[in-house]
Structure formats: structure tokens, C-alpha cells
Image: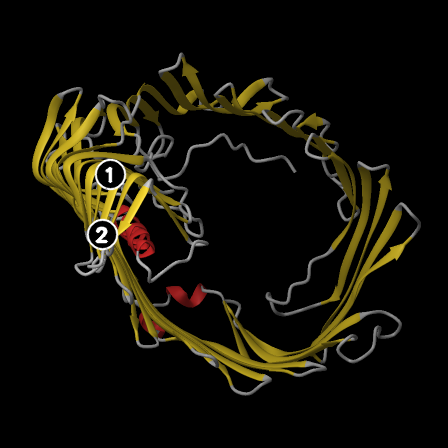
Amino acid sequence: MPGLLLGMFLLCVCLNLSAVAQEPDKVTFSADNTRWYADDKVTATGNVKATYKDYTVTADKAEADLQTNIAVFTGNVKMITNQAEVEGQDLTLNLKTRAWSLAKAKSKVMASMQTPAPGQASTGGSPLYISSTELKGDPEEVIVLGGTLTTCNLLHPHYYFDARELDIYPDVKIVAHSVSMLALDHRLIRLHTLVIPIRGLRQNLIPQIGSSADEGMFLKAAYAYTATSTSQGTLKLDLMSKRGVGVGLDHTLTTKLASSQASLYFLADKQIGGNNITGYLRHQQKIGTIDLNLTGNYRTNNYLYYPSSTNQDWQAALSQVTAKANTALTYRTSKTAGFGTSSTDTTTLRHTQQLSKTLTGSLNLDMSKYLATGMPAAGRELNTDIQFAQREKKYDLTLAASKRFDLDGAAFTGDNNFGSLDRLPEITWGTDSYRLGKKSFLGLPSRMQVMAGRYHETPNDISGNRYMVQWDMLGQNIDLGPKSELNVTAGLRQAYYASDMMQFSLKAGTMLTTRYGDYMKSRLSYYYQRPEGFSPFRFDYTGKYNYSRAVLDYQRAQKLKWSLSSGYNFNQTAFPWQDISLRLTAHPVPAYSLAVSTGYDLNRDKWRTLVGQFRLMRQNDIALDLGTRYDLQQGKIGLARARFDIPIGKKWRVEGITSWNGSAKQWDYRAFRLTRDLHCWEASLLYNEEFGFRNVKGISLEFKIKAFQTQDRFGIGQYGQAVDTSMGDFY
């Protein structure tokens, strides 16, 4: 903040001139001639220089009146810090208020033009170059009178803002009064007031023009009407030949105890003959020890979705966290109208309480209501769950009860097929050999669990008791020599349901790992589980497996990695073999990487798809990313995606994103951008074409000031997703 830095700096300089503060290790001062007067005045002439930490001020002459607290620096005044460079002829500073003014001034202020990502520090920003008849300020702001502002560092800048007054709030905003924006000596716009947010700017300050299949010829503009340390607002205006005139408002507000973000957009869509309204609201509020969160979305007749539909989602949540309790109450409602109507309302209560040092209780309640076109009545349900968990030094004890209540009864019978599980109740005791003070149980490190409960399961409408005992051997590593290691696991499970119903399950697993030199190793594993008996409950289903798998891995730093794997399922008779899978990644030099994966079906004697990806990372300022899926059986490309960024000479560059669907034999996505570097700003011609839920095709022209980083929509699909070259992998 130049005002604050300048005030602090010159205050330290002038105090150093007096006999009050003499700390040469903090402030150093030098001049060719220094003279003290009896009336507390000081003058210094000739190469006046003062430094404080990383700040430096130089001038031809300095005068200070310690009775009036006024200091004047004259002649080639210059102040340099890590954040600013200020130059001028006459600098006046009030030592008490730290207000200052500089005549015939020029300044270079470093301002962060981009909001850092969450959890990241600001990376600095582009400098603001200021010239004026007078520059003044205080610790909070800098005021430019009759001046210009630009981010272009040329002696004759490509563009600049010419204003009667510029109020600069470092790292917050710039407010220009009676301002004109000039480019190449031609006035583009003239406004009474212009607010430029320094951080968090999302909309381009320069209008965009173009054409698209949905909107026709368009002109889109945005105007930041306010930007303070606590709020920011932007007005939007869209002129579209097919749709009409759209207006919007985005506003954010942040205080010590609250933050809000609201957005509203209105378009009298002449193509569909209806009003397109889109709104968004998010509000967070601290009320004492309670946190309030409100979110809402409203969308009707939006041509980017379903033109003749209305969707709205609202949520209100109250939460409180204390040392011994955590409580949250949430209400959600969602309504959709268009091709039929539907609505869902859900109220949720979550509470966790620390009842004692070892005992914790929790209560969960979910009440829901659902109604849709064609339903005779609304479906209403209440799901309840309560638990008490006792954690002692040697064991854990848990008591749980849950039940679903069908509140609508016979009014709506469609929910009779819903699945649910009632625990009426269930008690669980668990421990392990380490907590019991033994390294092993029956000679083996173990985990044990005993459960008993009564259950009701729908939709099969089964009720009954279940008693279960389970033992698991904790994984053990057995050293078989300097290059081999064996890991062993096992488990037993016995469940009783009635006098004639029970189920026993045995499981075991081993993995032998062997290393061959520094880069290669093999893993040979075998896993077995076999249940015997019968369980009447679906939730108690125990799977059956009996298979072996072998993997050979090679990894030499990041330069080369590959793996070869396969397996055999002893429970399968028709297709027992797992595919032979190959995955390879090569990164021979930092600029290049190659990855391929495929498989061979041993059961059907055929190749799987070959997945490949090649990347060139900024070699000679060229970037290329290519991903493909190649059908080895049919000998054709199933899917190919590419993204590239290539400079053309020193001033031009072309970017592109493409996706080819070999099965449909058409392009899924094509986007190209040709950009001309105009030193401090740039011009881009964009073309995009996308097929999917709706076909999108258009061309547009964009101008951007480089210093004001806005959200880049290039490469963003119609669903808001980033279009990349990922192909997945073959496993």
C-alpha cells in the first residue's frame, strides 16, 4: 500500500532527524549537509537518502518542522519499496496523520490482480503506472488528481484511463471519476464513474462480440458498479439478435460475521416467447455460537437447459459445534416443473453428544416428502437412528437402534417396494489382542467382534434375530529372506438366525512379494472366502471368491514404469482367466511423456482397446496433449482427443481442443482460439462447436487487458465441465 508505506517511511526518516529516536540499526540517514535550528526545525541538502529495512527514499532537499509535524522533501523525490515506486518534485508529509501529497508525480504500484486460490498466498500482480499533476494519500488510499492510469509500461502506452480523479485502494479497487478509456489514442468509452476491482474480477471490462447458433449475433458487456474491501457488484448486459436483451446482477458481500453472494439474470426470450430468469443465493451468518447457511437456485425457461421448465432448489441449515456436542438442522426443498412436476422436501436433524469421557451418543432423524405427477398422494417417510458408543481401554461397546416409519400409510403404496433395514436394536462388542494387553490371541494378532440384534428388512418383509461372532487375524508380514516377504490374513465368521438357520464363513489371503534388483518386483497373491449355510437377510449377504493374481512391476524413478498382470478365478468354469493387462509410462526427459495401457483376453483370445496418451510440456513454448482409444480388433480409432497451444511468430498463438468419436464418426467437440499479443492486452478470435444434449456452434471476438485476469471459459463444455484429453485406463 503506497500511502501507508510512504507515510511510515518518511515518519521514520524525520524522527531520525530529531534527537528523540536514534536507532542506526533500524533507520539510516545521510545527506551532504544537515543543519539543526533552535525552534525544532531541521534541514538537509544534497543527496538526501533515508533507508528503513527494504524501503528507500531519496531527494535533493528535506525540511522538517517538529512543532507542526510537517516534513517537506523537494527535488527529484523518489521512494522505492517491494510494492511501489513513487517519483515527484515536492512531497509534503504530516507526521501525525501520515497524510501526504506529491506534486508532478509518477508512481508504479504493484497490485494483485487475481484472487489467489483457497489456501494459497497471493503471487503478486501487474504494476499500475500512474502519472498526475498531484498524487496524495494516507494509510488507506491513494488519490490521483488529474491523472492517468495504465498497466502498459511503454512511454506512449497502448491504452490508459484518463480521469479527473482516481481513488486507488490497494489490493481492493480503483474508482475513476469523470473517466475515459483510450486505446491507441482513440476514446473507447466515457463514464461518470468506473469501478475496477483489483481482486476477484470475473467479467471482462471490454465488451465481447460474436455469433452463436443459440444467440445469433451478440454483444455482451459488464460494468463493476462497486468494489470495496467488503463488497463487490457487477452489472451485465447481453444484446442477442435471436434472444433479445438480457440483464444481470452479481453481488458479493463479506463482513466479519457473514458473507453473501447473489446473482440474478433476466431475459425476455423472444425466441421461446417467455421470461428466462436465473437466480442464485448463498449466505453464511454467524449468530452467536450458531452458524446459519442459506443456499438457493432458481431457473426457468433457460435455453441452455430445458427451455420450458422451472427448477428451484433451496436449503437452510443451522449448526452448532461445542466442545462436547455437534448439532445440525437442515431443510431442503426441490421443485421441478415442465415435463410433469415433482417436489421433494427433506428435514434432517443430526446431533452428537459426548456424554462422558468414554460414552458418546448420536441421534439422526430424516423426514421426507415426495410428490410427482400421477401420484395419488405424497409419499412421506421418517427414518430414525440412535446410537450409544462406549469406548473403553480394552473394548468398544455400541448400542444402535434404527427404524423407518411410513407416514403416508395406505395413501401411497408405491413406497412398499423401497428397501430399508430396521435395527430393533443391535448391540456390538469389539476388541483386539493389543487392547487386551496381548500381542496375539491363540498365537495370532487378532480382532474380535460379537453382535446381537433383531432386524426387520424390506421390501422382502423379513423379521428375525441374528447373533454373530467374528474373528479376523491382523495382517502379518513374514520375512522369507533378503528379497521376499509374505503377508498373510485370515478370518472366521459364524452367524445364527434361528434353530434351523445359520451361516459360517471362512476367508484367507496371502501375498508374496519378491524384489529383483533395484527396479523390479513381483506380487503373487491368493484370496479365498467361502460361506456355508443360509442367511434370510439381504444385508447379511456374504460373497464367495477363490482367485489368484500375479503382477510384475518395473519402476525406474519417473523415467520408466510398467506393469504386467493377470489372474485366475477358480470359481469360474467358462471364463476363469483374467485379462493380461499392460500399463506403461515413459518420461525420458522433462518435456515429454508417453502412457499406454491395454489388455489381452485369454478366455476369448482377443485384444482389448489400446489406450494411449502423449504429452509435450512447453517445449519451445509449444504444448501438446493427445489421448486416444484404439480398437485393436477392428483396427480403428474409437476416441481421440487433443489439446494444443502453439506460438506463431512472436505475436500470435493458436490454441485448440478437439474430440473425435470414432463410433459415431463425428466430432464431439471442437474449439479453436487465435490470439494476437498486443503488448499490454490481447485480442482473440474464438470458434467452438459441441454436440451433445444440445448442439452448440459459434464464433466470438474478445479483447482482454492482460493485467486484469478474468475467468477463462475456453475449453469449458456445455455442462460446465473442463474438456480434457483423459481416456481413463485399462485394468
Q: Amino acid at mark 1?
A: Gln
Taking the image as shown, residue 187 lies to the left or right of residue 621, namely left
Count of marks, rendered view: 2
Taking the image as shown, residue 393 lies to the left or right of residue 194, namely right
522 or 233: nearer the eye?
A: 233
Image coordinates of residue 570 in percent, x first then y, are 80, 47
Closer mark to the observer between disc 1 and disc 2: 2
Image coordinates of residue 670 in percent, x first then y, are 38, 23
117 or 66: nearer the eye?
A: 66
In this rendering, the answer to whether 366 lies above or below 97 is below
Q: Quadrant of the C terminus?
A: top right
In this rendering, the answer to whether 369 lies above or below 180 is below
* Residue annotated with mark 2: 64
**Label 1 secondary element:** loop
> Looking at the rendering, which quadrant does residue 520 occupy?
top right
> Looking at the rendering, which quadrant does residue 430 occupy?
bottom right
Q: Amino acid at mark 2?
A: Ala
Check if mark 1's residue and mark 2's residue have beta carbons within 8 Å.
Answer: no
Image coordinates of residue 497 in percent, x first then y, are 67, 77
Task: Identify the residue shown where x is 88% and y is 57%.
Answer: 478
Q: CA distance from mark 1 to mark 2?
A: 47 Å
269 or 621: nearer the eye?
A: 621
In this rendering, the answer to whether 661 lies above or below 201 is above
Tell me if I can see residue 510 in this picture: yes
* Residue annotated with mark 1: 203
Image coordinates of residue 445 in percent, x first then y, are 82, 69
In this rendering, the answer to whether 211 lies above or below 330 is above
Outermost right residue? 481
Q: Residues within 10 Å of mark 2 (few under 14, many from 20)?
A: many
Outermost front residue? 38
